[in-house]
Amino acid sequence: MTERTSRKPAVSHIQRKLIPSYIFLTIMSLISVFPLYWMFTAATNTSLEVAQGKIWFGSNLAENYRNLIDGQNLWQAMGNSFFYAFVQTLATLLICSLAGYGFELYHDKGKDKLFAVLLLAMMVPQVATLIPLFTMVSKMKMLNTVWAFIIPGLATPFMIMMFRQNSRNFPIDTMEAARIDGLSEVGIFFRMYFPMMKSTYAASAVIVFMNSWNAYMWPRTVMKGNTVQTMPMLIANMSNGYAVDYGMLMLGVLFCSLPTIIVFFVLQKQFAEGITGSVK
Amino acid sequence: MKKKQGFGLLAKQKAAGWGFLAPASLLIFIMSFYPMVKAFITSLQTGPAAKLAWAEPIFKNYTRMVNDKVFLTAMGNTFLYLLIQVPIMLILAILLAQLLNNKDLKFRGLFRTLIFLPCATALVSYSLIFKTLFANEGLINSFLRGLGIIQENVNWLGQSDTAKAVIIIALLWRWTGYNMVFFLAGLQNIEYSVYEAANIDGASGWKTFWHITVPLLRPVIVMTGIMSINGTLQLFDESVNLTNGGPANATITMSHYIYNNALGQGVANFGYASALSFIVFIMVAILAFINLKVGDTRD
């Protein structure tokens, strides 16, 4: 009895000391959420209501949607973005996981040196490679194809490092055992490494998918025309007119943001692991 | 006989190792290193894209920069964003991580999720959201008018200083939670008992923050610092979509200006754009190197 009464004030004392933390974190949370909340409400309002500062849901969603699909290739762009991001994710994961596996589990001096050299690519600014890559892609007649979209992101030092770091948990003994059982080197990768590294694949997939869904500078350069454009390009073009319909624009922005927001909520743990994963 | 077979197996394994890493390595050479070399060569050339010729004198594109007012503005803008936004963001991110690392705090998961949420939005999306929020006839103006803080609408994106401020605010909004997650991961490696000991010794929250959290997080700070510097020097989407570089190039970033030179409207100037991009590359490399050295001073 005495213990209980003595403990209770201690807990509330701690909580009282945390009041400033609660206030600060609540303010920061509101600031973080508000622009996105407002995007949802604005998508249901008329342009005038948005401009007048209405911050509650309206009744203009259907009208905004009709205007949006009348003026823009919305579903084409959504389909394109999904398709490009999907192909990019599959291809990048395969290439980078193979490399991370090779660098970690077959490592020797030569490979370690090569790895150090590859890391330098992190410092290469995207805008610097833009012209040479654009020239390369157009010479290979790949402009406006999914290949042009995915090619610069197929192998990144970040993703290779991600798989290399996480491959440290893969037991080398099992590889030896598998070899004695007659499994080929490629067989070991697909039959043993791949199933064991599922969580790394999941985290990496989230990152690659989000990055390619959100990509803007490169797609804008190589994916010209209405039929091949991506969602970020579509909404960027929408906002360029003189008389912008804010309600319709925000609905477009909502369509562009929804897939990544859903991925975020469903796979938040993998997302957090993905961005911090390669620096363990 | 047996020995030979064993050697054959080892050689096979070795070859397999190289085989696994070959595609990615080749791609990085073709997609990053070769274009970088190519960009340098192009930076020494002038003329239309179809028939580039060696510049005369050879470093003409580089000397041209010194007198290019727009490029100097772009460089100034980029560094302004860097010097104001990155320190505020990192301090805020560490502070948030420190607060969320408290085991007595309730709703930690909820706070973390909400503050982390902005980085689920595409760069173009949030640029357009902020553009609309800060529009002349936008929510921010009607809110401030309602409070009586301003009488007339402020043309946020039409004036040089306020437009820069909006870009900085937008960047802070988008990236603070992202960096917080790195610090939270870093803090999980610090023994909680260190904090309890500090608490018993009566250290105040701020003292604990500056004397325990910040030094112990040094490696993470260096890493997030490098990432942020790299990202800020390459700012593009926000400059294009939030302000379109305006008013009158007042907010344009280096990448945006380079893009305009290379592939924007008007004449494509590959030679000059390449020279500019090579300068950005050197800046990224130097700043990353300094950051690594500064982060190393402890030992």
Image (cartoon, coloured by chain):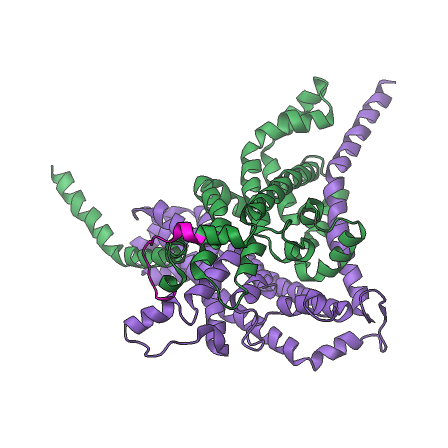
Chain colours: A green, B purple
Q: Quadrant of the N terminus of chain A?
A: top left
Q: Going 66% across and 54% down the picture, which residue do you hit?
A: A225
> Furthest residue to the bottom?
B67
Q: Position of residue B92 (x, y in %)?
A: 42, 61
Q: Going 63% across and 58% down the picture, which residue do you hit?
A: A217
Q: Position of residue A149 (x, y in %)?
A: 67, 49
- Up-down: is B252 above or below A129? below
Q: Position of residue B27 (x, y in %)?
A: 74, 46
Q: Going 77% across and 43% down the picture, which residue do you hit?
A: A110
- Up-down: is A40 above or below A192? below
Q: Which residues are magenta?
A: A51-64
Left or right position of A157 against B145 = right
Q: Quadrant of residue B212?
A: bottom left
Q: Quadrant of the C terminus of chain A?
A: top right
Is residue A41 inside the magenta stretch?
Answer: no
Q: Nearer the viewer, residue A192 or A228?
A: A228
Q: Nearer the viewer, residue B218 or A197?
A: A197
Q: Position of residue B100 (x, y in %)?
A: 37, 51
Q: Main secondary structure of the magenta part?
A: loop
Q: Quadrant of residue A133?
A: bottom right
